[in-house]
Image (spheres, helix red, strand yellow):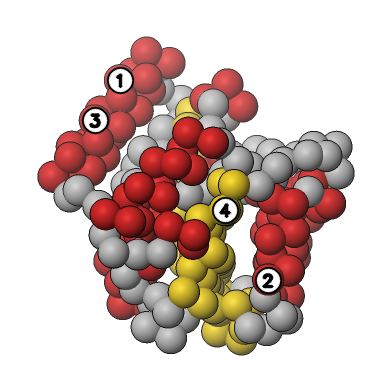
Amino acid sequence: MTARTSLRPRDTVAKATSRIRHEGFKQAAEYYQRRNAGVPWLPQSTIAMLDEMLLKTDRCLEWGSGTSTTWFADRCASILSVENDPAWYQRVRAELTEHGRDPDSVRLLSLEPTSRPAESPYVRAVDEFADGKLDVCFVDAEHRPTCILEAMPKLATGGILILDDVQGYLDHPSRCTYSREGLGPLNDEWRTVAEALADWRLIWTTDRYSDCAVWVKP
């Protein structure tokens, strides 16, 4: 989740009240996760929508492995999940094995050079896919702006791009207590992303604790 220090409350209520509201929405999201083991930490509306949109023939690329890895693996023909944390990588491999999925679907790749993220093995995993041959891309970890820009040409027409915690990066009406609404994109990198995706169909979902954006490639 994006640090609140880079955001501001979406209305003029006192800071203390904003923190209480934010904590309440967080607890509600956590309760949903406890009651729905195996479901990615995404707004419920996002989960329901993706359940309808995903096809058994889809090829999926995921930056940032987790519960979502097995969830997508159960719904798509294939998944390549990219991870940079060794402990988390081992945990996701174990979860895939437990659910009868290929543990080699997740790869441990370096973020270096961090000053030139497009050159990192982490981002360059996108080269596994030819242009127009990727159906689903889920971005929920490091080098997010670069990952998005590199994935765009790889997605097929009608392909979907998913960005979690989008309220911390892009300016859009939001029901979250803390968001970029009215502030513009987080920085120039995110401004470039917003401009690049301007003509893509956007579906913005929320649980009021975090927002998730789903773009459909025209």
Helix, strand or loop at mark 1 = helix
The residue sitting at 39% across, 41% down in the picture is 91
Mark drawn on residue 20: 1
The residue indicated by pointer 3 is: 27
Helix, strand or loop at mark 4 = strand
- Relative to 50, is 64 above or below? above
Q: Nearer the viewer, mark 4 or mark 3?
A: 4
| Residue 15 percent across, percent down from the top left | 43, 16
Kind of residue indicated by mark 2 = Glu
The residue indicated by pointer 2 is: 128
Packing grade of label 1 (10 A; few <14, some 14-19, many >=20) is few
Between 97 and 22, the residue placed more toward the observer is 97
The residue sitting at 35% across, 28% down in the picture is 22
Kind of residue indicated by mark 4 = Arg
The mark that comes first in sequence, 2 or 4, is 4
Q: Are marks 1 and 2 in contact (CB under 8 Å)?
A: no
The mark that comes first in sequence, 1 or 4, is 1
Number of marks present in the image shown: 4
Kind of residue indicated by mark 3 = Gln
The mark that comes first in sequence, 3 or 2, is 3
The CA distance from mark 1 to mark 3 is 11 Å
The CA distance from mark 4 to mark 3 is 32 Å
Direction from residue 63 to residue 145 in the image, left or right: right
The mark that comes first in sequence, 4 or 3, is 3
The residue indicated by pointer 4 is: 107
The residue sitting at 38% across, 67% down in the picture is 73
Kind of residue indicated by mark 1 = Ile
Q: Are marks 4 and 3 in contact (CB under 8 Å)?
A: no
Q: Are marks 2 and 4 in contact (CB under 8 Å)?
A: no
